[in-house]
Image: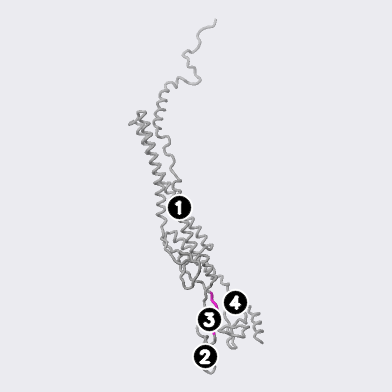
Amino acid sequence: MTHDELAREADALTGGPAFSAWPIRGRRLRPHKGGGGDGGARQMEEDRQRRVTAAVNRINAIFNGADVLQGVGKASQYTPGQTYYNADGSVFVAPTNTVQQEISADQAGFYTDGDTPQHHLRPGVQEGSRNNGNDSYYYRNVQVADQDAINKALQNGLYTSVQKVTGQARQPLYDEQRDAVYDLNAKDVNRQFEEAERANRFGLARAGLLGGSADVDSNADLQRRTNEGLIKAAGIGDQAAADLQTSDERARQNLISMAQSGIDTGTAGQMALSQLDANSQNAASARSGATVGSLFGDLAQAYLYGQQQAGLRAGVSPYQNYFQPGVSNSTRSGYGGSVQ
């Protein structure tokens, strides 16, 4: 049976690697492992999971206020031997491809003397075959730069230097937002109190009620409403801080979802920094949005008005029983004469 016939029989029986692809040393076959496998799917999934984990870790680090590195100075070309950085500040390692470098028999190994001389291969040298196994050759696997992958990396962003971005804890920003909103509204409460107290004092003075019970009661109510306004201002401040924190957490979760969908670590880091900055600016511009509103309204002269109404009611009280709707108010009960 010829070699080709044997190859066809083996292929039909095993369905595995082509028999003709098995390397031959002398007259002996050297089968290799082959057949089956997942086509590299498992390795690709493991690589994807590593990228996702790296991107998520960077997002969390930035949102937690950790210091991070960031590539700067975008490169326009790649020069072998020069150090480049990814967007996340890590050193760029140029991808490589494995290729076969054919070598001579003398370079491949050496012979030993004896009854049957043998050719021993040097470490790293392999023997291959071609022309349906009729010819053999020797080669080493060598790594060469993958220029296509390098060009793609340039398009995505390679950087010539790196800088440190100092992290900023978000909790102090939440506290700052709360305090700023509270201070803004507390000032408004105090302003309203001063205006209401002054108007109330002038009104009482014109009515000659300063120092009386109306004065005491009106000032007590002014103070009560002021305290309620300050409590309301504190609540508005707490809500403003909570809103900023909610915006941050929503942004974090959105970026994590994007990382799981495939964005790289550098892009994730840049987006996280940009989103936090945008949230801070939006919160600062919204500080004046929520206010305590009008606390006193017409309260300034409320007690004076109340005293006037009380006096009016007291003045008309004696006549309320006398002047009643539907009842005759004449002192004469009827006509006492007679008609002639």
* Quarter of the C terminus within the rendering: top right
On the image, the x and y values in percent for residue 200 come to: 38, 33
Residues marked 4 and 3 touching at CB (< 8 Å): no
* Quarter of the N terminus within the rendering: bottom right
Nearest to N terminus: mark 4 or mark 3: 4
On the image, the x and y values in percent for residue 310 come to: 40, 27
Q: Nearer the viewer, mark 2 or mark 4?
A: 2
* Amino acid tagged 1: Gln
Q: Residues within 10 Å of mark 1 (few under 14, many from 20)?
A: few
Instruction: Write the start and end of the magenta stretch as one range.
Output: 97-103
Q: Residue at x 46, y 71 (%)?
A: 82
Residue 35 is labelled as: 4
| Majority SS type along the magenta span | strand
Q: CA distance from mark 4 to mark 3?
A: 23 Å
Q: Label 2, on which residue? A: 111
Q: Secondary structure at mark 1?
A: helix
Nearest to N terminus: mark 2 or mark 4: 4
On the image, the x and y values in percent for residue 121 come to: 52, 86
Residue 140 is labelled as: 3
Residue 281 is labelled as: 1
Q: Residue at x 60, y 85 (%)?
A: 135
